Image (spheres, coloured by chain):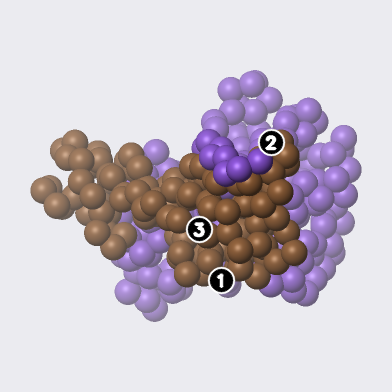
């Protein structure tokens, strides 16, 4: 959730980078979204379409690369991918984990002209 | 210009993290301990704050930042105790963020403050995700909510420095097992301290007061624990 405020942050970031190179239009945006970031792609697209009107990002396409949540069990050390926010170790069934990946939320690259 | 590809690799939540860092720097400039108090609605955050303010009259100078979607109810209650208090209405937002807390801090007499207690919006999910610049994250859970909540809200429980179990005075009327709860919290967050209290009867509060005072001392010694 919080796609609205994240889209606002995204627009600011995009405009900053585009202006730096004198670009007049933003065409494509490539985002890396971790499974545990809580982001729903459709919600981002919806808010982005609305918030980007009358900006140089209007009409830009969003592309999402999903990063799965990699967890490491604190009890037995097993590294596993979480399924649907399940934090229990599949081997020893303990609940203590370290999050190795899955909380990412960043702009990888963008295409401008 | 033709089409150009720009490598960005920039975090989208970076802005809040930056502002949180600045809040902490501001607090440390005045040697103030910032405490973020989070819980579900009705778990007892305001009651806890009222008890703390009353008890700390001669121990340390407390100021309060109240966060709510709407109304000034909590700030008014705190205001009756004659301590500096600021109410932040998010107008629909489900959590306080670093920007809002900054505005709150700028409206408090920082030169005359030792501890700022931040009462976050009642919410177990979003409040855990947004850094405010706090030194300590205190999470409050009340007995009627049940002992299985750690499994359901893992982020909140794994981020907390201290977990307070409130309303222990009504434990006989609910199926709340404290041992089960402590085990669940311990699995997610082995370093979190757990204290059973009743903000209503005062039971267990001394341990909370001592913890808070100790956190302030640690900060002043320059050895404060990092919250996030």
Which quadrant is home to the N terminus of chain B?
top right
Residue B7: image location, x then y, percent: 53, 36
Q: Residue at x 31, y 49 (%)?
A: A69
Under circle 2, the secondary element is: loop
Report the residue marked by disc 1. A46
Q: Earlier in the sequence, mark 2 or mark 3?
A: 2
Cα separation, mark 3 vs mark 1, equals 11 Å
- As drawn, the chain in brown is A
Q: Colour of chain B?
A: purple
Nearer to us in this view, B71 or B212 = B71
Q: Residue at x 81, y 50 (%)?
A: B103
Report the residue marked by disc 3. A62
**Marks 3, 1 in one chain:** yes
* Residue at the far front in the pictured view: B2
Alpha-carbon neighbours of circle 1 within 10 Å: few (<14), some, or many (≥20)?
few
Name the chain under label 2: A
Report the residue marked by disc 2. A21
Q: Is residue A39 left or right of residue B131?
A: left
Q: Earlier in the sequence, mark 3 or mark 1?
A: 1
Question: Disc 2 or disc 3, which is closer to the eye?
Answer: 2
Name the chain under label 1: A
Placement of A73 over or under B183, stated as above or below: above
Q: Is residue B179 left or right of residue B70?
A: left
Under circle 3, the secondary element is: strand
Q: Residue at x 77, y 34 (%)?
A: B26
């Amino acid at each position: 959730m919080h796609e609205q405020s994240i889209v606002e942050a995204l627009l600011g970031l995009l405009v900053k980078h585009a202006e730096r190179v004198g670009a007049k239009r933003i065409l494509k945006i490539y985002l890396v979204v971790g499974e545990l970031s809580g982001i729903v792609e459709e919600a981002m697209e919806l808010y982005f379409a609305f918030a980007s009107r009358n900006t140089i990002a209007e009409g830009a396409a969003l592309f999402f690369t999903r990063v799965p949540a990699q967890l490491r069990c604190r009890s037995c050390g097993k590294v596993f991918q979480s399924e649907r926010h399940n934090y229990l170790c599949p081997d020893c069934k303990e609940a203590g984990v370290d999050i190795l990946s899955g909380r990412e939320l960043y702009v990888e690259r963008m295409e401008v002209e | 210009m033709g089409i150009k590809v720009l490598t960005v690799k920039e975090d989208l939540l970076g802005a809040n993290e930056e502002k949180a860092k600045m809040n902490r720097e501001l607090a440390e400039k005045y040697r103030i301990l910032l405490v973020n108090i989070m819980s579900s609605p009705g778990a007892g955050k305001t009651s806890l704050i009222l008890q703390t303010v009353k008890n700390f009259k001669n121990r340390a100078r407390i100021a309060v930042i109240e966060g709510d979607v709407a109304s000034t109810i909590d700030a008014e209650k705190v205001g009756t105790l004659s301590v500096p208090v600021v109410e932040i209405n998010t107008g629909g937002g489900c959590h306080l963020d670093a920007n809002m807390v900054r505005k709150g801090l700028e409206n408090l007499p920082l030169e005359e403050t030792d501890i700022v207690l931040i009462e976050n919006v009642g919410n177990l999910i979003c409040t855990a995700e947004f850094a405010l610049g706090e030194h300590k994250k205190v999470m409050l859970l009340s007995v009627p909510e049940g002992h299985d909540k750690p499994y359901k809200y893992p982020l909140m429980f794994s981020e907390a420095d201290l977990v307070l179990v409130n309303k222990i005075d009504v434990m006989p009327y609910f199926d709340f097992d404290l041992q089960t709860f402590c085990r669940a919290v311990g699995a997610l967050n082995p370093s979190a301290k757990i204290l059973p209290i009743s903000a209503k009867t005062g039971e267990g509060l001394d341990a909370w007061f001592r913890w808070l005072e100790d956190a302030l001392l640690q900060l002043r010694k320059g050895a404060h624990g990092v919250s996030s």
